[in-house]
Amino acid sequence: MAQRKPPKTLRIGMIGAGFIARFHLESFTGVRNCAITGVYSPSRESRAALAARANELGLGPCTAHGSLASLIRAKDVDALWILAPNDTRIATMQAIHKAVKGGKRLRGVACEKPLARNLAEAQAMVRLADDAKLATGYLENQVFSTAVERGKEIIWRRAVPLTGRPYLARAAEEHSGPHMPWFWQGEKQGGGVLSDMMCHSVEVARHMLTAPGEARESLKVISANATIANLKWTRPAYVRRLRREMGREVDYGRRPAEDFARGTLVLEDPDGNEAMIETTTSWAYVGAGLRIQLELLGPEYSMEFSSLGTGLKVFISRQVKGAAGEDLVEKQNAEQGLMPALEDEAGVYGYTSENRHMVECFRTGAMPSETFRDGLAVTEILMALYRSAELGRTVHFGEEDLTDYVPPVARAAAG
């Protein structure tokens, strides 16, 4: 039977209209063969604003839907991007599964990181997608960062064939704290900074250590060790600040989630060599803005990247006064002085390449390089790191079933 001709345009429905949805939307201006035709958010104001912005950018025509079911069933939606809060992921995927089993045709579903709050939920996401025979994409933007794409290509083409595989990847991501209240709440987000940001660091590090075209599973995870801490946001002045800015539900005097995490993973590569990943994440970093630092080390080479080591910098004197914003760099902490500026945040962070890849895979029927199964693998690693921090010792893979494990901060908040 002949394959159906790929549609010229992939029509995308966005589930969620918050910060990350707006970031994705801006990146789609650099993606061909797609349109943003629908959006759903429980907030009427948010979904209307995102639809209006999509139309303003020429990405539509985009409709703001009053219900999730309406968006999923829409005749002008071929694929869905799940960009809603972590605690809504399962219900969202169940609604998609029900619609597809009932006859709705979708070319794919992509989900923002992390795939789920814990391993049981991640397994459910994969199971629902598999049962509905859906192509899936795991939206881990750092894997598609322009610096990572170029750096990895050079290292694996020029250095690895002559001197051997890389053996150490370091990944750090730090900023001064999330935008929305639910990120700070362990039961809704699934944890603290380890869940929120180490998912980035783990996957981009695994990606750098994996040969081009090689399955990610070729790197066998042996053990995980982690330390977590509350360094800043449990101090009384910052507890009060969080409650003032995020609302009474965010009370770090009684229910804190970690604002610092460090993790070490030991792996075995396909040649039987030991490899390591070192990760650091923090909501307690105060600098110009979001800082991502990546390194890859091998026998006779290294590569490194810092998101704040920009070629473009601007200086603004104290005489230039204005409202606070994020017009120079994400999570910006100042508007004056010598500031780094990212010419194309969506491109540098990987959102444009990520969405370009997912669109073309879903449109043509190819398998994305990052799927829900990669999100599942990352979630298992995160749970091992949380378990290590809870026990105060290294956790060896295969020794403990983490399926029903929930990080203490999520358990405590839920109770």
Image (spheres, helix red, strand yellow):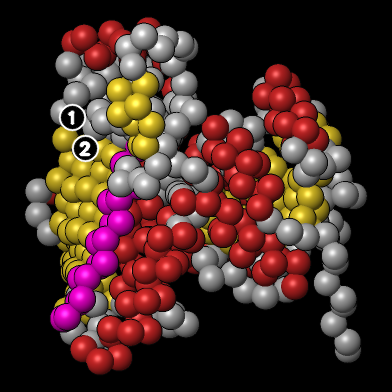
Is 30 drawn above or below residue 238 in the view shown? below
Q: Secondary structure at mark 2?
A: strand
* Magenta stretch holds residue 253: no
Outermost residue to the left: 393
Tell me the amino acid under the disc marked 1. Answer: Asn
Measure the C-alpha gap from mark 1 to mark 2. Answer: 6 Å
Q: Which residue is mark 2?
A: 260
Is 221 drawn above or below residue 63 in the view shown? below
Q: Position of residue 406 (x, y in %)?
A: 33, 44
Tell me the amino acid under the disc marked 2. Answer: Phe
Q: Secondary structure at mark 1?
A: loop
For the magenta stretch, what is the residue range?
A: 290-307
Q: Which residue is mark 1?
A: 230
Pick whichever, 388 or 145, lies toward us. 145
**Would you say residue 407 is visible in this rendering?**
no
Q: Is residue 239 left or right of residue 180?
A: left
Q: Are marks 1 and 2 in contact (CB under 8 Å)?
A: yes
Q: Quadrant of the N terminus?
A: bottom right
Residue drawn 49% across the image and 43% down it: 343
- Circle number at residue 181: none
